[in-house]
Structure formats: structure tokens, C-alpha cells
Image (cartoon, rainbow, N blue to C red):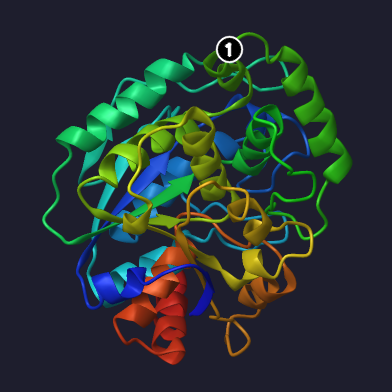
Amino acid sequence: MQFIGEGDFLECVKGAKATFLLAGSVTQTCEIEGITQAGIPGIIHLTPTLDAEFVDSGKLFSLESLAETPKGVPTPAIITRGVKVLSGFSFETIDLGLRVKPQVNRLHNLAIKESKSIATGAKIDAKSIIEKGVAFAQAYIHPHKLLILGESTPSGTTTAYAVGKTLGYQCDGYFSSSFLHVPTSLKVQVVEKAVAFAKGDVYSRLGSVADNMLLFCAGFVSAYSKTGKIILGGGTQMAAVLLIIDALGLEIESQNIALMTTKWVYEDTHSDIKGLLAQLSFEVDGYYSDFSFKDATIPILKLYDKGEAKEGVGAGAALCYAKMLGFSDEEILGEIEKVLIS
């Protein structure tokens, strides 16, 4: 695990047991052809459902096979599942607009519907979704000292890019992608269409360009940080959550927050997570896992090291958490390969 920057978050949570909360959401932006490869073509909306089921139990109920890229690279859920088995963290899912409800042991259903494509205006009541995040955080109780918040939102890096652009941050080329060869021109076209729909006050503009995960998590993180330690498990999408918090001036205890991601995001030449975090008016600790699949015995996993998939389902935070508990890369890799072939 490597330090991106700022303070002493790790010292405060050393050896702490964790609950992992997965925010699953569908934005119809994922149905734009070529915009994402985070799932099975034609049924990409199932990705967060399958991710939740697999991390929860190592089994699938809503489809027979795991979500994977067209090249066969399996979802980062295999990484998070492997760490769950090793560490024994508690796992919960929150439904932020899933088309198909996952069959998991603990599901929080907030009656939020999937959002429209940002290419035609997402049509989200942004203020309401943010307020739901705040209310949920204020009522949420779990038994551990540490909370890890992950996400599964196909095409979420595109909506995150649109959010950053709409809020006036420097972000062209800053947001990651599940692709090795990023469809930059398509993403830019979609974001430009989205920004053109963004009219009115800041909430109205966010409601046109965001997704439910980004908005809910902004409210949730701001409120939860006042009472507990939270790891944002993800890359540039979780950075966008912080950008929303900052732009709206939501109250926050930033010393209680850390962002943890993978080396594949941190080293990605097509994005700049450090550059996004540097634009915040407050400071949060940042870390990335230096875990690699170079010694994998399952060849397809090595494509992660070449830039396929990169992050999702809180994989980077899961890897960092495993190292925080003292597990070796060999132990982590062994468990990931085990859950993939079992």
C-alpha cells in the first residue's frame, strides 16, 4: 500500500474490524453503445446486482456467469470477495436504483429508481437524493470501528466526469475508465451533451449530469464523517463524490475520511486521481494498493496489470484493508484465484 498524500488516518484505524457497504446503482448512461465495458453487453445493468451477490456469498443468483469485459477480464468483485473471505469483514448492499434486486443477506432498499442517461438529461431530484444520503448516515448503525464504502455503477466514470465539468473543476482527462483503450471522443461527446442540459441552480445542474450513487454518497459521506471513520473504496468516481461535497459546501470532518484505490487507477495515464483530490478545499488521506497480478496462475487476471478494468466494487480499498490486517500479496492472490475457480 502506498501513500498518495495528507495525514494519519491509518494510525487511527490500525487493526480495526470493518463493515463494507456497497452502493449499487444503474444509470441508463451505461446503455450508450461503447461507453463502458463494465459488464456483459446487452445486460450491463445487471453488473451491480451480480457484484453484490458475488461479494456477499461467492455465488450468483441473477445470472449464471460473472460480469466481465469483452476480453474476459472478470469484475473487480472477485478481488473484494477474496478479501472478504480472508478478513471476514461484514458486507451490506444499498440499492440506489438497481433494475434487478440482488439476492444478498442484507439489502438496504431506499425506493430510489434508476436514473436516465445523462446524454438526454438524467432527470434526478439531486437535492432529495443527497438528503436521503444524509438521513441514512444519521440512522445507520454497524458494529465495527471502520466503514468501507464501495460502489458498482457501470458508466459511472462518465457521469463523474460530467459532474466535475458541470461544477467547474479542471477535469478533462482526469477521470478513469474500465477500458485499456479509452473511448475518449465518445465520453467527451456524451459529457458535452450532458453539460448542455445542466441549467438552473447547482442542484438542478447536478440532477441533469450525475447518477444516484454520486449524489447519495455525497450526502452519506458528509454526514457519516461527523461520527465515524470511513474509507471511500474507489477511484475517480469517489473523488467526484468529494468534489460534490466541496462544491455544495456540505459540512464534513475530513480527517475521518480516506480514499483508497488500486495502483491501476493511480498509475493510469488516461486519468489523474491525485489531480482531482488536489482541487478540494479540504484534505483527505489518499492511498493506493501496490498489489499486482504478475504472479497469477490464471492468465486473464494479468490483463488488470495492462490496464483493463482497473477498479470497482471497492477493490482498491479491499486490497488496502487486507494489507492493513497483515495479509501478504501471496495470500490475497491465492484467495482471489480460489474464489474465481470455485
Q: Which image quadrant is residue 290 in?
A: bottom right
Is residue 82 in view? yes
Which of the two residues, 273 or 290, is positioned nearer the viewer here?
Answer: 273
Residue 178, given in percent of the width and then of the height, sits at 67, 54
Residue found at x 27% / y 43%: 224
Residue found at x 51% / y 48%: 238
Q: On screen, 295 above or below 219? A: below
Horizontal side of residue 135 vs 117, given as left or right: left
Callout 1 amino acid: Asp
Q: On screen, 103 above or below 254? A: above
Residue 12, given in percent of the width and then of the height, sits at 25, 71
Which of the two residues, 43 or 331, is positioned nearer the viewer here?
Answer: 331
User: Dot 1: what SS?
Assistant: loop
Horizontal side of residue 107 vs 35, given as left or right: left
Residue found at x 46% / y 43%: 48
Residue found at x 51% / y 31%: 26
Is residue 309 in view? no
Query: Which image quarter holds the C terminus?
Result: bottom left
The residue pinned by badge 1 equals 201
Horizontal side of residue 74 vs 111, given as left or right: right
Residue 66, given in percent of the width and then of the height, sits at 50, 55
The residue positioned farthest toward the right in the image shown: 185
Q: Which image quadrant is residue 319 in?
A: bottom left
Residue 264, given in percent of the width and then of the height, sits at 64, 69
Q: On screen, 240 above or below 2? A: above
The residue positioned farthest toward the front in the image shown: 281
All told, the count of numbered labels is 1
- For label 1, count other residues whose C-alpha is less than 10 Å away and answer few (under 14), some (14-19) or many (20+): few
